[in-house]
Image: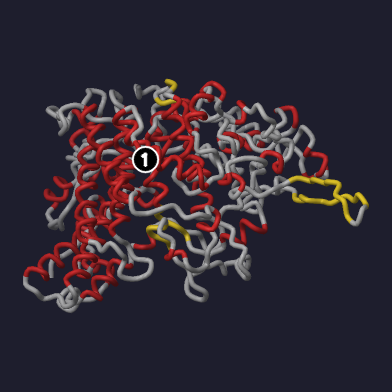
Amino acid sequence: MTRLHYIFITSLLVLFTACEDFLQREPLDFGSEEEFFHNVEDMAMFNATFYDQFPSISNWWGGVYATDNNSDNQASHWPNNNFFKGEKQTPLLNKSEWKFETIRDVNYFIDRISTRMADNSITGSPELINHYLGEAHFFRALNYFRLLFNYGDVPIIDKELSDKFEDLVKASKRAPRNQVARFILADLDSAASKMLVTEPVLGRLNRDAALLLKARVALYEGTWLKYHQGTALTPGNEKWPGSKVYPDFEFESGSIEGEYNFFFEEAYKAAGEVAQSRPLYNNYQDLFNRTSGIETIEEVILARHYATGIVMHGGTYYLSRSGGGTGLTKACVESFLLSDGRPIYADETGLYKGDAMVYYALQNRDERLVQSVKEAGFIVQNILVDGVMVEDTIVDYLPRINVVGNQGTATGYELKKWISYEEGQDVAGQGTSAVPVFRAAEAYLIYMEAYYERHQSLDNRCDEYWKALRARAGVSTDYQLTISLTDLSKENDLAVKSRNQFISPVLYNIRRERRSELVAEGLRYMDLKRWRALDHMVNYNIEGINLWESFYQYYEPENITSEIVSQSGFGNYIQPLKLNPSAESYNGYTFPKAHYLEPIPVSEIYMTSQNGDVSTSPIYQNPGWPDKTSGIADYTADMD
């Protein structure tokens, strides 16, 4: 049989150590090549191993509900070293995302299946054979998007590699990021053309999943190229480290503007195909806490399913009984609109009740906020009972700001989203509520943003989708009112700027809509990167609830000391970064621009070089990062 290899460093290490056991095993240990891949059931089984790459909730702590701790939307007690200088380092290979195992396995699968199809040696319906071949293209695209997101330029490998050293080195050559993105879109076109409109089995992929991922990738690359153009992070200029490898580089569209407009068009076309046939479900909160029936909701394109006694999670247990090691930030909460469509600073009718307690901050607000955050405070009202006025406690809940770690909340705005209220779901490790992976609401948002980015205007479908999103959220559908009342200087949101320049109020409100709809779903950091909004993160303090105006009186003093929560001297709002005076992040986050891309493990560069001369390697390091192990970025590098 053909010997198989992990590409790049893994392949090369294998060659140098002559590890025959690895070289001669089948990918994923599915038995011999001669016995496998002769029926559609084998194909389904092979692809099933890749489904664990989708967002999930851990059996204990963590998962999709805490992913946005890596952004300005949510925070834990632990500073994020991506947002300050001096701690993040070039990693070892096994601690990095420079991983190609799935790509290797998919290439093997596609090659074998194509051969089997050519000689008619696969049994099963042609529709299912094509479907599972389409799934393979999807997973290759998904993994290339992971690489694009982390590294930008990466090698494009679409076939099995030989075991010759020179072939492996040649295959290691990084391709310009826009070409990688185009390769991903082509793979997703193949997936969409092959996969069934309706998934063959509960929990499997379908055509719309490929289209939505295509739209996500195209929007990502389009906005990246637009807002990072002219920097070392995009091809086509002398600052780009790939210019030495590609001295005659030209964009396929003729210019970087033509290139990002190509991606915007691809994004809204693919998103439109999904959005036009999938209406929004009428209950936002119900999308994130169902233990059954999620497959009947048209909005949900793909969900990750759990089952009692087979695979379960601890989401509801952690979030319902504790702070869950996360919490929305003040900035995130303040970006949600009032129910009449006004920003909170533009309230003229008294709808906004302030934030002296969490309960007040949730009154008359976008329902997506109300359904995502636990009511908290101590609220007593007088009510009439049998002709007598009596006191009635309507809220009596204190956020767990008095606990540091995964049982507490760093901000005080505890998550309600992802909590299931069905019996038994709050038992440790016994949760079975489904996790939506792809929703049509994202297609609505992508269409709006990509169309506006391309044409600087809104068409009828933008109008339809925007109104549908706001109507479900219980917000006035008059988005033009919101736009007219938006004062970007009063918005507490990094996304008001790209390249450190204010964007238009229209585009900002599209970004606001996205932030509100996808809160606590793990996509915010991706957005901040592609918008180049992190340039605006300078001396940036994460803030949480208003504790020190009056709310503090409901806590025992010994439970809110300086070791646990920031004190009133820093202001009324708690600041998780103020717990350790010796920490680099104590005075706030300032995002190092070198961190927009991850450093490539140095072993990869040396292994593909000639005699250890890194300048000869086809794998060039990302801008600002050194060619040495455990090295920090050069923060003086030109990243603008």
Determine which residue is flagged by label 1: 629
Q: Quarter holding the N terminus?
A: bottom left
Q: Is residue 36 above or below residue 582?
A: below
Q: Is residue 289 above or below residue 605?
A: below
Residue type marked 1 = Thr
Identified at 18% across, 35% down, the residue is 616
Q: Secondary structure at mark 1?
A: loop
Q: Quarter holding the C terminus?
A: top left
Query: Is residue 626 visible to the viewer in this orientation of the structure?
Result: no
Q: Is residue 205 above or below residue 548?
A: below
Question: Is 543 left, or right, of 36 in this rendering?
Answer: right
- Residue 486: x and y in percent read 52, 25
> In this view of the protein, which residue sits in the foreground, 494 or 619?
494
Packing grade of label 1 (10 A; few <14, some 14-19, many >=20) is some
Question: Is 92 left, or right, of 416 in this rendering?
Answer: left
Question: Is 466 left, or right, of 114 in this rendering?
Answer: right
Q: Total label count? A: 1
> In this view of the protein, which residue sits in the foreground, 61 or 280?
280
Q: How is the protein colored in the picture?
A: secondary structure
Identified at 23% across, 40% down, the residue is 619
- Residue 620: x and y in percent read 25, 36
- Residue 228: x and y in percent read 33, 28
Question: Is 117 left, or right, of 615 in this rendering?
Answer: left
Query: Is residue 444 visible to the viewer in this orientation of the structure?
Result: yes
- In the orientation shown, which residue stands out farthest toward the right? 388
Q: Residue 237 is drawn in which quadrant?
A: top left
Q: Residue 112 is drawn in which quadrant?
A: bottom left
- Residue 318: x and y in percent read 61, 58
Q: Is residue 296 above or below residue 592?
A: below
- In the orientation shown, which residue stands out farthest toward the left? 119
